[in-house]
Amino acid sequence: MSGYADEERSMYEIWWTFGWPYETSAMMARLVFGGFFDRWPNLKIITHHLGGMTPYFDGRVGLGMD
């Protein structure tokens, strides 16, 4: 993946550095809003990178998704 349209390959690996934690956070939000934990209340999820960005953006997540 490239960071800019005119790059054939990411020069600074920005997608690799920030992409995984973002994608983990997006996946976790989709599980919540998709009702997975309502349908399977005992479901346990283990994520990499300490749960993505969510623990670090706790205050922002609460305000933004309320």
Image (cartoon, grey):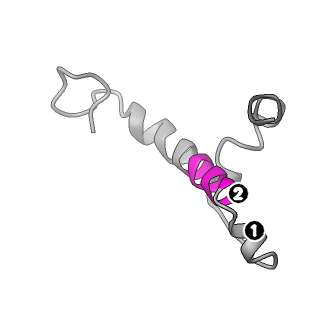
Q: How crowded is mark 2: few (under 14 residues within 10 Å), some or many (20 or more)?
A: few
Mark 2 or 1, nearer chain start: 2
Name the spot of residue 10 as percent of width and height, x first: 28, 32
Could you tell whether 7 is left or right of 27 in the image? left
Quadrant of the frame with the N terminus = top left
Residue underneath mark 1:
37
Q: Mark 2 and 1 residues: CB-CB less than 8 Å, in contact? A: yes
Could you tell whether 39 is left or right of 6 in the image? right
Q: Which residue appears at 69% of the width and 63% of the height?
A: 35
As drawn, 44 above or below 60: below
Residue underneath mark 2:
32
Name the spot of residue 57 as percent of width and height, x first: 75, 34
Give the alpha-carbon distance from disc 2 to disc 1, as whole Å: 6 Å
Magenta region, residue range: 24-33
Viewer-nearest residue: 30 or 45: 30
Secondary element under disc 2, as helix, strand or loop, is: helix
Secondary element under disc 1, as helix, strand or loop, is: helix
